[in-house]
Image (cartoon, rainbow, N blue to C red):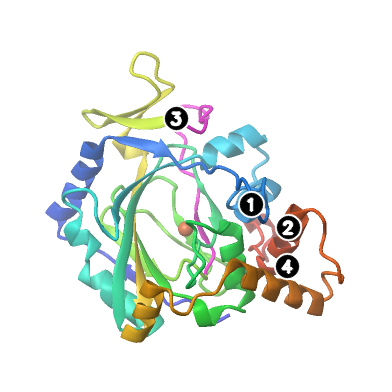
Amino acid sequence: MTKAQYHIFDPVLPEEEARSLVRLCEDFGTYGMYAEEPVKEGLGAGLAQRHDAARNFIMTGGRFSSDDPIEVLGARTNYFRETYAYAEPIVAGIEGFHRHEGFMEAAKDIFDRPIIEPAIVYANLLVPGQELAVHTDVPEFRGVNRTKDPEWLIVAMLHSGLFDKWRIPIATAVSWYQDCEGGEFCFYPDGKDAAPSTIPARFNTAVVMDTDSYFHGVDRMKEHDGPIPELMPGMKLVFEGDGMWRIGPADAPLARYRWDEMRFSISWKAYCFQDEAEREAWRHHTDDISQQQVVDTLVADLRKRGRLGSSLPDDQAELAITIIDEYIKYPPPASAAA
Ligand SMILES: [Fe+2]
């Protein structure tokens, strides 16, 4: 694997603009928990969208191999997310960030592609004791995307290297607006078997890289007042004013946090096209691959590798797990690394 190219930004924005993003976050006010529903039907029905990352996290206990019980591991990764822009800005005040020139130039450089189309901007909020399991992001291919295909399958497509012809490279910026204790961005620029690098989360800094190809995660946020509460899917994080946030209802909160013990990041993603013809093919679906073609290609490759016999398993989940295990190879936890 070639070494990841990445660009660091320090600062990301003039200070006053960066502070205005903190106010935008407060004004937005309520953040839902990013916890996924399992895929209901079709290939791999019953598995989580990111079965690959969830299983790796539970099996290893995270980057530092914690021996927390499964409910605690769940609470650690049930962080909070809301979307600020999707193709177009959704929230007033995010327009400048959505078309950040430095990010766009970095995206061009990383993929050596001249046409950059900003796609999505979203905020992630982590409370003390939370972390983000090591993963690669869900990439995109013409004809296959997360709105209709299982996320683990799209991730396996990228790692298989068999579908590059249909891939739309996506550049990702991760930017931070808090000086955090813990919560470092950890990534593997030299590939999964080499030592990772970490970037501390500091106010008004960012990194731009290919997070679809390179593994990354967020190390655990320092716990201040005892262990993490039982954070369950469906809970909300609400800004109360005066630098305070709350999880749960006002009259019976599960926890309260000060801004300075939390982690607030904004992610930016942009499609990177080689030329107008490629952008048009993506927009108008003139050169798509279907999910069936993807599965047929993977099955043929698995047979060539001796991982599948001539008949397919009756259980579709079994085929899904064979695909995940063969193509998505996670970095070893820190304790096991050389
Ligand atoms: Fe990510």
Q: Please, what is the three-letter code of the amino acid marked with disc 4?
A: Glu
Range covered by the magenta-colored residues: 214-235
Compared to 329, does 38 lie above or below? above
- Residue 166: x, y in percent? 50, 78
Residue beneath disc 4: 326
Query: What secondary structure predominates along the stretch shown in magenta?
Result: loop
Which of the marked residues, 4 or 1, is nearer the chain's N terminus?
1
Q: State the image coordinates of residue 270 (x, y, percent, origin top left).
A: 34, 68
Identify residue type, mark 1.
Answer: His
Identify residue for label 3. Answer: 235
Q: Mark 1, residues whose alpha carbon is within 10 Å: few (<14), some, or many (≥20)?
A: many
Amino acid type at image mark 2: Ile
Residue 48 shows in the view: yes
Which of the numbered marks, if any, corresponds to residue 51?
A: 1
How far apart marks 4 and 1 lie (CA) works out to 14 Å
Classify 10 Å Cα crowding around label 4: few (below 14), some (14-19), many (20 and above). some
> 329 above or below 58?
below
Location of the N terminus (image quadrant): bottom right
Amino acid type, mark 3: Met
Q: Earlier in the sequence, mark 1 or mark 2?
A: 1
> Residue at position x 33%, y 18% from top?
250
Q: What whole-number distance in Å separates the C-alpha atoms at marks 2 and 4?
A: 8 Å
For label 3, being within 8 Å of ligand 1 is answered no
C-alpha span from label 3 to label 1: 22 Å
The answer to whether 50 is drawn above or below residue 7 in the figure is above
Q: Which of 319/330 is in front?
A: 319
Q: Is residue 130 magenta?
A: no
Does label 4 or label 3 sit earlier along the sequence? Answer: 3
Measure how far apart labels 2 and 3 are at the Cα level.
Answer: 30 Å
